[in-house]
Image (cartoon, rainbow, N blue to C red):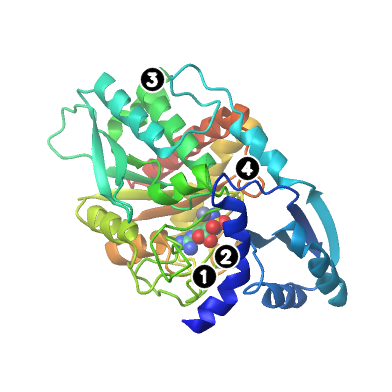
Amino acid sequence: MLFYLFICLPIIQVSLAESAYEYKSYKNYKLYEVEGDHENFNKVLENLKDFVELPYFETRNDKLEILIAPDVNSLFEEITSFYDLKTKVVVEDYSEIIRLEKSGYRRNSVFSWTAYYDVDEIYAYLGNISKEYSNWTEVVVGGESYEGRKIVGLRINTPTEADEPKKIIFIESGIHAREWITPATTTYFINQLLTSTDPKITSIRDQFEWQIFPTVNPDGYHYSFTWDRMWRKTRSKSTFFCYGADPNRNWDYNWLQHGATSNPCNYQTYGGSEPFSEKETRTLSEYIQHLDNILAYVAFHADAQMLLVPYSDSVDHIDNYDDLIKIGKTSLEYGYKVNGAKYDGPATAAEILYKASGGSMDWVRHALGTPLVYTYELRGRSFHWPPDRIYEQGDEVTQMMLGLITEACNLDYC
Ligand code: 0X9
Ligand code: ZN
């Protein structure tokens, strides 16, 4: 305990000082891109990781992206220069991005896709829309959070002549609190399924039972919305001072093997005290386990702009890998036609992103044998996406889902 107290102290001091009374501003935090030897990226991170506040870092496209607090700036410059790394500031003042993001246009109390909304507002939208389409939609509860919130989703199941129950398409989104674009595009997609007059969209709506959960980490999302924009984890209490576990490292498959840490004070990838230690993952996994006949499990993340297939901690290819790739490619082609945005993949995370164990996608595939399992990493920069452009990714996701289903049916999965 003393050990954690020691390593957390500087981090705690910063966060208490800045966020005890108001939304953490991130004033003068700089987003850096670092180029050079990868081994040296790790050395820089090793030097900083447990001693200073690091709200975000990730290696992407051969570059390290890292957000640096003003009081760490000179130390960071010193260490990177010591390891012969080239640094470039890509965002001068991170608080400016947050300010713009929060100033999205809200039409008088009508839920829309030109602003970001807190979890209660998202749930209110689901409640309202389910009343509007009460003959074939219902609000469903997929689990519960540490702070006692429900994990609320929408079930869409239009009437059918067939005797057989429909296959289910399950959508999980918002497992990482700060990836705000994912609940926004998921609700956008719900709206498309319910209101679009495009026969292709109404046809996929009618062909399946949909279970769509826009924010499966409601405490974390609320915290990110009201206290700390960069919060990723749940909000369970781990030690006197450290909170939350990474809900995408907490599922019971190869738990803590790769890309996760057992340090509860780690801001990003603490895997929890044991598999399913988090109420969110435990209750949601129980809910999913009791659903019959899931054809596809789709998880939405941001913002690596790629499509991933299981497993995330191995480069081995699973038995229907070729089909998953073919279906994934068609999905990306459909998405590309909307705005010309090119995604990496489809591939395993181990091949194009990094190895990470304990994610929902891997557990679903391993424990339930669900045939089609994907993680979409949507677009953005360090989890930000302008609110007035949510519709772009909403339309892309709609088409990507259409492409996925079209190709899956071509290959006889439907
Ligand atoms: O690290 C993650 O959990 C995901 N990337 S993110 O930047 N959104 O945090 C990648 C998830 C890959 N899938 C699994 N690990 N199951
Ligand atoms: Zn994520």
**Which quadrant of the figure has residue 340?**
top right
Q: Is residue 268 left or right of residue 167?
A: right
Which residue bears the numbered disc 2?
12
Residue 265: assigned label:
1
Label 1 sits on a secondary structure element that is loop
Up-down relation of residue 322 to residue 201 (above or below): below
Task: Give the Cα distance between marks 3 and 1.
Answer: 44 Å
Please, what secondary structure does the residue beneath circle 2 have?
helix
Q: Amino acid at mark 3?
A: Thr
For the residues carrying marks 4 and 2, which lies nearer the camera in this image?
2
Location of residue 391 in the rendering, given as x and y in whole percent from the top left corner: 55, 28
Q: Nearer the viewer, residue 374 or 317?
A: 374
Q: Identify the residue at image location x=62%, y=74%.
A: 50
Residue type marked 2:
Ile
Residue at image point 36% right, 66% down: 251
Task: Describe residue 388's horizontal placement relative to residue 194 as left or right.
Answer: right
Which circle marks residue 195 in the picture? 3
* Distance between mark 4 and mark 2 Cα atoms: 25 Å
Amino acid beneath label 4: His
User: Which residue is painted at 40% across and 41% down in the image?
Assistant: 214
Could you tell me how far apart the alpha carbons at marks 1 and 2 are, in whole angstroms?
10 Å
Is label 3 within 8 A of ligand 2 (CB to nearest ligand atom)?
Answer: no
Q: Are marks 3 and 4 in contact (CB under 8 Å)?
A: no
The 10 Å Cα crowd at callout 1, few under 14, some 14 to 19, many 20 or more, is: many
| N-term mark: 4 or 1 | 1
Label of residue 384 in the image:
4
Q: Quarter of the image containing the C terminus?
A: top left
Is 319 above or below relative to 263?
above
- Measure how far apart labels 3 and 4 are at the Cα level: 27 Å
Give the residue drawn at x 34%, y 34%.
123
Specify the quadrant of the image occupied by residue 96.
top right
Task: Give 11 or 262, whichever is nearer the viewer.
Answer: 11
